[in-house]
Amino acid sequence: MSEQVPVSEIASAIAPRLVTVRSWGDASFLSLPMVYPSGAFVTVRLTHVSGGVRVSDSGFAYRELESFGVGRSFSRTARSVSQRFDLSVGKRSIFVDVPNEDVERAVLEVGAASRDVAEQIVDRALKEAEADISEILQEKLSRIFPDMVDFDSKVLGASSTEWEVSALTRVDGHTTVFQAVSNYPVAVYKASTAFHDISALDRPPNLVSVVASKKDMGSNLSLLAQAGKVIEIDMDDLSLRGLAA
């Protein structure tokens, strides 16, 4: 049996890797143990200003939102979130000027605010995009499978995690899970994770991801296809019925 390593030693080894620092010219960038919706680490920039240091997210939250196509929502949400931390908001960044002794606190607050802004806006965009698909899916399944479909159900995966799904049909002893998926990496990874977990059951249901357009999904399509069938929301009723039969 190997010798037990003291947790203090483990903690000491991990701590330096949780934050990384890079410097260019008169600016230093700290990568923090917080993540944006895309999985990128939250990063703040330190620069000198008169009387202290400016701590800024350097526009990283804004660029994160732009990658999701929702950058226009930055200003309003950033102002709301930043008020909680008493921070300032520029056209594309969140920042605060503080004396040297308050830099540590400012780094944590700017990082948290930057992450919260990105999470709130992306989460809202995901829900809106998936709601459009879910609405059409609900109308179709209600028409095709009256009294044989449940909406906004939960399915227990092999890990004992309960996953929320868009719809669940039970037809002739066959159970089929339908999940509306928008074309955002976060939504794709969430659906893929859920479907892989559900597929690991001893008797898994049929798993179907429903998207607006396969063509628009790009490489995300292959991720979804690994865990189940992928269909477009405009699939005809006959083909849709065949998936659940």
Image (tube, rainbow, N blue to C red):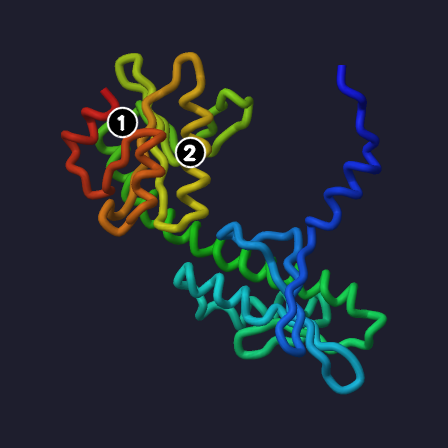
Residue 229 in view, yes or no? yes
Report crowding for label 1: few under 14, some 14 to 19, many 20 or more residues within 10 A (C-alpha).
Answer: few
- Where is residue 233? Give x, y as percent: 24, 42
Q: Inspect the image, locate mark 2, and give the three-letter code of the amino acid beneath it.
A: Val
Task: Determine the image quadrant of residue 199.
Answer: top left
Closer-to-camera residue (79/93): 93
Q: Please tell me which residue is depicted at 45% across the width and 34% down the height of the picture.
A: 193
Please tell me which of labels 1 and 2 falls first in the chain. Answer: 1
Q: Inspect the image, locate mark 1, and give the three-letter code of the amino acid beneath it.
A: Pro
Task: Determine the image quadrant of residue 227.
Answer: top left
Instruction: Count the numbered circles shown.
Output: 2
- Where is residue 192? Give x, y as percent: 41, 35
Vertical position of residue 217 compared to residue 107: above or below: above
Q: Please tell me which residue is depicted at 29% across the width and 49% down the height of the picture.
A: 218
Residue that numbered label 1 is attached to? 146
What is the number of the mark on residue 60? none
Instruction: State how far apart marks 1 and 2 are (Cα).
Output: 18 Å
Q: Secondary structure at mark 2?
A: strand
Task: Determine the image quadrant of residue 25.
Answer: bottom right
Vertical position of residue 174 compared to residue 187: above or below: above
Residue that numbered label 2 is attached to? 165
Q: Please tell me which residue is depicted at 68% across the width and 70% down the height of the picture.
A: 83
Closer-to-camera residue (100/37): 100
- Where is residue 157? Give x, y as percent: 49, 23
Vertical position of residue 222 compared to residue 200: above or below: below
Q: Secondary structure at mark 1?
A: loop
Residue 138 in view, yes or no? no
Vertical position of residue 45 compared to residue 7: above or below: below
- Where is residue 49? Give x, y as percent: 72, 83
